Amino acid sequence: MNVTKKNLFKRQITLPEIGEIGQQKLQDASVLVVGCGGLGSPVAVYLASSGIGKIHLVDFDFVDISNLHRQVFYSLDDVGKSKVAVLSAFIKKRAPFTEVSFTTKPITKENVFDLISEFDIVVDGTDSLPTKYLLNDACVLKNKPLVYGSLYKFDGYVASFNVLQKDGSYSANLRDAFPEIATDIPNCSEAGTMNSIVGMIATQQVNEVLKLITGIGKPLANELLIYNSLQNTQLKMKLKSKFLKDKIAKLFKMQTYFDAACTVQNSDWQISSEDLRVKLNDSDIELIAVLSNLKLPFKVHQTIPIHQFDAEKFDVDYTKTYVMVCQRGFNSYKATKLLKKKYPKLNVLNLSGGISSYNK
């Protein structure tokens, strides 16, 4: 089949606001997509389909069966495979003019500048608050626009942060909306989400990227769009640029941007769902949930939200084996580490994969 840019992008080029000049701008652009789940996977596919010349995907995760209800570019056959490898192969089949590459390592404070330096625009498709702030702060320090997307149950949030203005200044960033990283907000796997709001926010992010590259329309700069899918209502939170580069540079030096979901877990501190089922009623097993809103398939002895978890105040019993539990095994592993650091000889185990794994 003879595929040319003119016939592939005909409907888009027909728009007088885009035309061949705008299409060439898209071809010349490069975009970094961090997170290839519910937001990042459709963002990447739509951007490639729009004619973005270079896309780099970042995600360390693998396709899980629970992803498929909202991550529609993965299939049952892809379960267990690398998300970025599957998504890259999908894009290559439909976007011949897009160069797509990927990284399977988590984005961290140590590698973030190397990753963002080669790209015109960074898209945040993650569900990790520390990573969102890491991307925001790095983009501010390196003068990169960041297209932000976030979800909470039926609400979605979109903004274009750190956009160069006509006067040479930069628009507001994430810290102008939410100055500090919240510690008690559950992610999508813990709070739940409907697939429709995920798709809506992802395409809003695509829309922002296309506007920024082509120069048409009005990007969501200096404002945060908040959309509620149940009521079909939206509002725009006006933002003022107060967290400037010098202030964020100081914060960047101080913060670790640590996310337990992005760390390699000690295999010696794990208990599988199968083993826990066998030992569930043993008298020496004590179960502790570190999230208060969990729907549990078994009773726990204590519930201590992770943001309130203090190993110093933990009443230990060395005859017990403590099993820490959360939705996906990340916050519970954090609690496990805290206890093992304080009480190295205490028997503490993390439910590997969390309740999500136990319920399968």
Image: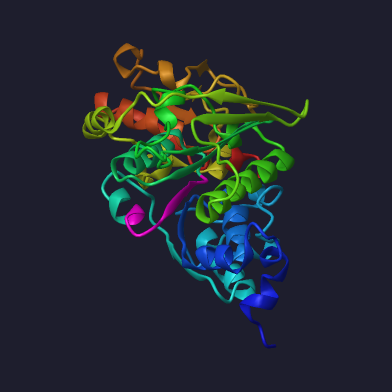
- Tell me which residue sits at (65%, 26%) in the image: 295
- In which quadrant is the N terminus drawn? bottom right
Out of 4 and 216, give the one closest to the viewer.
Answer: 216
> Is residue 122 in the magenta section?
yes
Query: What range of the chain is rendered magenta?
Result: 115-125
Answer whether residue 47 is visible to the viewer in this image: yes
> 1 left or right of 215?
right
Residue 148: image location, x then y, percent: 51, 40
In the image, taking residue 302 as reference, residue 115 lies left or right, namely left
Indicate yes or no whether the magenta region holds residue 333. no
Q: Position of residue 310 (x, y in %)?
A: 35, 16
Residue 297 visible? The answer is: no
| Left or right: 101, with 186 as reference point | left
The C terminus - image quarter: top right
Check the image and name the residue furthest to the bottom. 1
Judge whether 21 appears above or below 351 on screen.
Answer: below
Q: Is residue 352 above or below residue 41?
A: above
Query: In the rendering, at what x and y percent does residue 35 appear?
Result: 50, 50
Q: 38 or 119, which lies in front?
A: 119
